[in-house]
């Protein structure tokens, strides 16, 4: 019995038909989109890295810097990228082919513009994915606001889409860079104005990284920017009979613009972590805002010498606050923590300098350092140097002595000699006598300043 051999039919041997190409996928993979994402990512990352010490350690400052570079640098670049993509039809001579296509003009516009507009948004989100984890190890309190990042990403999409419309309308090869320059100027100039209209600028920064936007502010700005972009798209790409629909997004944008202008600065609020304190210490109570909570052990260590010298001294300040001025005579204010200067990546940049500034505040009290006769300034300087008693204060005294010798005048030499003698007398006092003298000194300089009541030294 022989086996039956079946001959394959022509239908079974024919190659399976390939699926029709998808324009969106083609633009995302092989068009300008990947390069746009890389360009925006590098454009945002370079200034972020160069200023990393000024934003690492604070969520508000990190998002402030991200928003600044995204709006002022990323926005104009996204517009230029969209403009170049929009001018592609003029360069390739495909305007007639597009007119004969089965898709409507609006669908063609969105198919060509949105995939490329996704590039700048992806580049921004990638930069955020680098900056936020880089700041996280050094933050003490708070959390990122995801709505802010979403609003900035949609802003970049809107800028690219508007740029695409401009590229279709203007047949000029220099249109993309010119559009970027004009967009940068339009975004930057309102920041220097005083009127309430400046709050419509998406690049406006308020609070210098110390305040948070209220919950609805990112959504309002998104509706304002995207509403304008949608109106531009409908006017430029929709069929003639559908163009009046542009009034709908334009009306929504105008309505939210009124809300933004009327709200003004009230769209930002103080960071709650900046008003919540955490404290340590006994003889000298040291309190810092929760947003700087991780610095408390370092601050306490830097001021341990001062705290020890003030132990048992009556009338001396017994509290140092980070977030408020002296609410009572026994409390003084800590020096402000500046990211990138006094604080770098969660660490005190110079503990001795920080202690020196605290010593100045404690020694001069409410009298201030700028006024007073020679006797008061000499006595206060001696108290300051005795409180600090660090290598920094010794170097400063040596520098003052060297400067007095260089000037060579008898008055300078005599003044320096009296200053060193005053410090020597304070240092050589018996502990009990020194505590009594310091009690009288602080009674005169704390609260209502009484320079005449400062005891002789």
Image (cartoon, grey):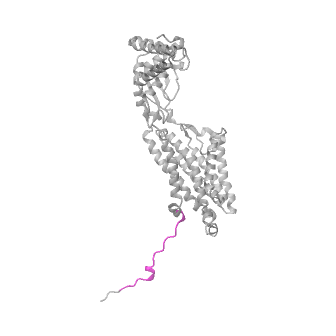
Query: Magenta span has 17?
Result: yes
Query: Magenta span has 308?
Result: no
For the stretch drawn in magenta, the main secondary structure is loop
Residue at the left extreme of this rendering = 1
Position of 43 with respect to 279 (left or right) is: right
Is residue 283 at least partly visible in the picture? no
Q: Which residues are magenta?
A: 5-24
Report x, y in % for residue 383. 46, 17
Report the number of numbered marks: 0
Residue at the bottom extreme of this rendering = 1
Which image quadrant is residue 318 in?
Answer: top left
Report x, y in % for residue 47. 51, 44
Q: Nearer the viewer, residue 457 or 160?
A: 457
Report x, y in % for residue 285. 44, 24
Is residue 118 at least partly visible in the picture? yes
Tell me the quarter of the image containing the N terminus: bottom left
Position of 236 with respect to 64 (left or right) is: right
Is 155 above or below relative to 53? below
Which image quadrant is residue 368 in?
Answer: top right
Is 44 above or below relative to 376? below
Report x, y in % for residue 158. 59, 53
């Amino acid at each position: 019995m022989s086996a039956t051999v079946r001959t394959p039919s022509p239908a079974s041997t024919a190659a399976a038909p390939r699926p029709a190409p998808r324009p969106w996928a083609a633009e995302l993979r092989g068009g300008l989109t990947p390069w746009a994402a890389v360009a925006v990512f590098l454009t945002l990352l370079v200034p972020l890295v160069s200023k990393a010490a000024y934003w690492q350690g604070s969520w508000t400052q990190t998002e402030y810097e991200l928003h600044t570079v995204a709006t002022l640098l990323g926005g104009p670049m996204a517009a230029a990228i969209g403009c170049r993509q929009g001018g592609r039809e003029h360069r390739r001579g495909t305007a007639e082919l597009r007119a004969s296509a089965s898709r409507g003009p609006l669908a063609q516009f969105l198919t060509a513009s949105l995939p490329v507009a996704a590039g700048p948004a992806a580049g921004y989100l990638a930069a955020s994915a680098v900056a936020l984890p880089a700041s996280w190890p050094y933050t003490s309190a708070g959390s990122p606001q995801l709505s802010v990042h979403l609003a900035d990403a949609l802003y970049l999409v809107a800028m690219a889409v508007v740029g695409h419309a401009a590229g279709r309308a203007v047949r000029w090869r220099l249109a993309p860079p010119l559009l970027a320059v004009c967009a940068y100027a339009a975004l930057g100039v309102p920041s220097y104005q005083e009127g309430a209209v400046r709050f419509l600028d998406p690049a406006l920064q308020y609070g210098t990284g110390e305040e948070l936007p209220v919950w609805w502010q990112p959504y309002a700005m998104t509706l304002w920017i995207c509403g304008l972009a949608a109106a531009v798209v409908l006017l430029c790409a929709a069929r003639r009979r559908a163009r009046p629909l542009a009034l709908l997004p334009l009306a929504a944008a105008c309505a939210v613009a009124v809300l933004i202008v009327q709200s003004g600065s009230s769209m930002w609020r103080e960071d709650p972590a900046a008003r919540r304190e955490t404290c340590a210490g006994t003889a000298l109570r040291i309190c810092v805002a929760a947003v700087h909570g991780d610095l408390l052990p370092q601050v306490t260590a830097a001021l341990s010498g001062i705290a020890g010298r003030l132990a048992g001294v009556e009338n001396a300040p017994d509290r140092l606050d980070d977030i408020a001025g002296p609410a009572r005579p026994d409390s003084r204010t800590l020096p402000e923590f500046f990211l990138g200067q006094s604080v770098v990546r969660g660490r005190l940049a110079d503990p001795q300098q920080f202690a020196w500034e605290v010593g100045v505040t404690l020694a001069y009290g409410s009298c201030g350092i700028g006024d007073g006769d020679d006797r008061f300034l000499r006595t206060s300087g001696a108290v300051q140097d005795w409180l600090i008693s660090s290598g920094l204060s010794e170097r400063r005294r040596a520098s003052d002595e060297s400067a007095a010798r260089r000037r060579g005048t008898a008055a300078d030499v005599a003044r320096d000699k009296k200053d060193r003698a005053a410090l020597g007398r304070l240092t050589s006092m018996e502990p009990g006598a020194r505590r009594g003298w310091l009690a009288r000194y602080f009674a005169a300089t704390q609260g209502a300043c009484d320079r005449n009541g400062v005891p002789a030294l």
